[in-house]
Image (cartoon, rainbow, N blue to C red):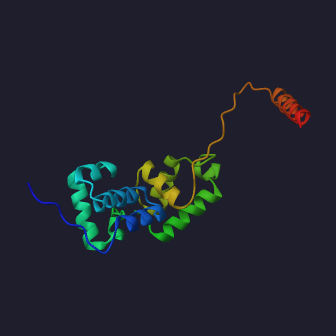
Amino acid sequence: MGSAVPLRTDYSATELRRLARRCSDNRQIRRLLALAAVYEGMNRTQAARIGGMDRQTLRDWVHQFNKHGPDGKTNAKGAGRPRRLNDEQMQELAQIVETGPDIEVDGVVRWRRIDLVRVMAERFGVECSERSMSDYLAELGFSNISGLPRHSKQDAGVIDAFKKLRQHAGSARS
């Protein structure tokens, strides 16, 4: 069985706990608290449990901490697949969504993701999934909002009377 990897000596448990309090990344907080427990003399298995990991993962984090310090425990964003739309196309997509569909040209009264996927393929020659379209829309700051369904036989007069009754009841309580 191997020996424990020593922690760097320029930090203490108190300093790591202070850093953890100021940190906003929950995963980094768990890592810092597990390392603080090691500094205090807790065995590595118990310290790993505090961080919600196994002993080997804690060992890997100790190596990262020794090499990069507390900032080495942040979650680096992976490169991932680059998006299929360039910045200019993203701005045009935002304009398309803001403007809304033209029923005569687009054949729809409101945009759905599947409609935007089709428009994107027609205008930009780029195909993507509905899921990717959701990511593009989120990146542009759009959210999914849909109106509540309305029954075809719903009586508007009954709704108005109900609203007036609710308003009157609310003002009577005040």
The C terminus appears in which quarter of the rendering? top right
Specify whether 157 is left or right of 33: right
Check the image and name the residue furthest to the left: 1
Quadrant in the picture for residue 72: bottom left
Q: Position of residue 32 (x, y in %)?
A: 36, 61
Q: Position of residue 119 (x, y in %)?
A: 51, 55
Check the image and name the residue furthest to the bottom: 10
The N terminus appears in which quarter of the rendering? bottom left
Residue at point 57% right, 48% down? 144
Q: Position of residue 98 (x, y in %)?
A: 63, 59
Quadrant in the picture for residue 161: top right
Residue at point 59% right, 47% down? 107
Specify whether 70 is left or right of 139: left
Say if 47 sits above or below 167 in the image.
Answer: below
Say if 71 sits above or below 165 in the image.
Answer: below
Residue at point 49% right, 61% down? 123
Residue at point 50% right, 60% down? 139
Specify whether 149 is left or right of 127: right
Q: Camera-side residue: 33 or 168?
A: 33
Specify whether 158 is left or right of 139: right
